């Protein structure tokens, strides 16, 4: 369990972020699946954790850091009306980012198999009316899309690192 979010993973396999990334990549390779990442809040930490693992190129297609709100629409296809109504820190934004990155990082018209997305507020100030620590993580696969919304306590660095680790764990749980 991370910050009150139950996790159905075997805790002995994923004690550290590096172990989580390694296990995720092993499972993706076993399935013959690829992964793409769309990051806002985490600014590249998720894809960095994945490519730190030797052999990551067997499953990782790439990552998009869409930190600015207009890039979420322009690059990832997040609905502009949604962004105008709710801002970038919203569970539906995370859902659309995860689905969008699958298409953006696909090949020959075939989407990548897994899309991971993060959006939220790391601070030091609230954003779009959302308090610091608000996080939305989405994982999209051919089987469906799941969004987890939570609040992570701590400073900017802790919020970003915990979010990246949790995103990888959520992707593992989706497989």
Image (tube, helix red, strand yellow):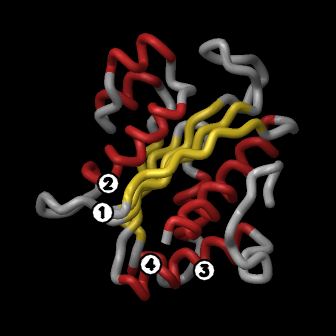
In terms of sequence position, does the residue under pointer 1 or pointer 2 come before the other? Answer: 2
Q: Quadrant of residue 112?
A: bottom left
Rounded to the nearest whole Å, what is the CA distance between mark 4 and mark 1?
11 Å
Q: Taking 85 as reference, is 9 above or below it? A: below
Q: Residue at x 35, y 75 (%)?
A: 33
Q: Residues within 10 Å of mark 2 (few under 14, many from 20)?
A: many
The residue that disc 1 covers is 112
N-terminal of the pair, mark 1 or mark 3, is 3
Q: In whole angstroms, how far apart are the C-alphas of marks 3 and 4? A: 9 Å
Which is nearer the N-term, disc 4 or disc 1? 4
Judged left or right of residue 61, residue 42 is right
Residue identified by numbered label 4: 28
| Residue to which mark 2 is pinned | 102
Q: Quadrant of residue 53?
A: bottom right
Q: Is residue 18 above or below residue 139?
A: below
Of the numbered discs 4 and 2, the one sitting upstream in the chain is 4
Which is nearer the N-term, disc 3 or disc 4?
A: 3
Q: Identify the residue shown where x is 43% and y is 52%.
A: 145
Q: Position of residue 66 (x, y in %)?
A: 45, 36
Q: Position of residue 124 (x, y in %)?
A: 78, 23
> Mark 1–mark 2 contact, CB under 8 Å?
yes
How many C-alpha atoms fall within 10 Å of the one at disc 3: few (<14), some, or many (≥20)? some
- Check disc 3 and report the residue beneath it: 23
């Amino acid at each position: 369990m991370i910050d009150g979010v139950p996790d159905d993973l075997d805790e002995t396999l994923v004690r550290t972020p590096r172990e989580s990334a390694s296990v995720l990549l092993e499972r993706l390779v076993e399935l013959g699946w690829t992964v793409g990442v769309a990051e806002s809040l985490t600014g590249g930490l998720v894809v960095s954790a994945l490519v730190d693992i030797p052999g990551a190129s067997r499953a990782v297609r790439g990552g998009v850091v869409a930190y600015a709100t207009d890039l979420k629409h322009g690059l990832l296809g997040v609905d502009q009306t949604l962004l105008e109504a709710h801002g970038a820190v919203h569970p539906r934004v995370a859902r659309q980012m995860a689905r969008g990155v699958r298409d953006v990082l696909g090949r020959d018209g075939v989407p990548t198999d897994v899309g991971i997305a993060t959006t939220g507020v790391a601070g030091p100030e609230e954003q779009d009316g959302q308090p610091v620590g608000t996080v939305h993580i989405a994982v999209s696969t051919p089987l469906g899309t799941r969004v987890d919304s939570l609040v992570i306590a701590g400073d900017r660095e802790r919020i970003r690192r915990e979010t990246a680790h949790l995103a990888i764990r959520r992707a593992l749980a989706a497989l």
